[in-house]
Amino acid sequence: MKACIVFAQEGTDSFCHAILSRVKQSLDKQRISYELRDLYQMQFQPVFTSEDMHRVEQGTMSEDIASEQTIITDADLLVMIYPVWWWSAPAILKGYIDRIFTNGFAFRYAENGPVGLLQNKQAIVITTTRESAETMSANGYDTVVKKQIVDGTLQMIGYDVTYQNFAAVPYVEDAARQDMLHEVEKIMSSIRQPVGV
């Protein structure tokens, strides 16, 4: 089994980095090989340029897009870890999705709308927010965040998605953050091996 981790948080010592560390530890423990795509460390170019668009329309693509698509294709599991900014993903991750999950690779258009092409794959999406779960629920922001990446992107293109947001991260006690990291371990332990493995 192979995994791809797409990580979108700058720096080295955020709570997202602690989550990433637990995810890697869990994959190592389960002997699941993985590719880490640390978008800030990679200095990933997130703009889906007009040249990119024309190449996709012609059935070709930029070398960096082709490389990432190969990693995604080879992975049975996709793990996305990122902080929520403006009730959405950071721009660098949105750009990754725009450039990599292209028409003809991740989906195609049929008579009744888009059809996902990345079937029989699992995804785990873990986000963090400053806001409390109560605030997010009261304003409907929890639904907005989930629908954008989980429902409107990954499920649409074929993934079976597990989603977890950790709320009020800067304001809770360290013990609560440790509980969150234990929850990460539980989520990772629920990974299903692909059929035939």
Image: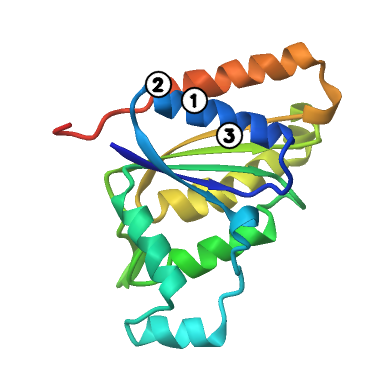
Where is mark 1, residue-wise? 25
Q: Are marks 2 and 1 in contact (CB under 8 Å)?
A: yes
Is the residue marked by circle 2 packed among few (<14), some (14-19), or many (20+) residues within 10 Å?
few
Inter-mark Cα distance, 1 to 3 = 9 Å
Quarter occupied by the C terminus = top left
| Residue 92 seen from this side | yes
Where is mark 2, residue-wise? 29
Taking the view exactly as shown, the residue that stands out farthest to the left is 196
Q: Amino acid at mark 2?
A: Lys
Q: Are marks 1 and 3 in contact (CB under 8 Å)?
A: no
Quarter occupied by the N terminus = top left
Mark identifier at residue 20: 3
**Mark closer to the chain start, 3 or 2:** 3
Q: Residue 95: image x %, image y %?
A: 59, 65
Q: Amino acid at mark 1?
A: Gln
Q: How many marks?
A: 3
Q: Residue 155: image x %, image y %?
A: 42, 48
User: 122 left or right of 142?
Assistant: left
In-front residue for pair 182/165: 182
Q: Residue at x 32, y 82 (%)?
A: 59
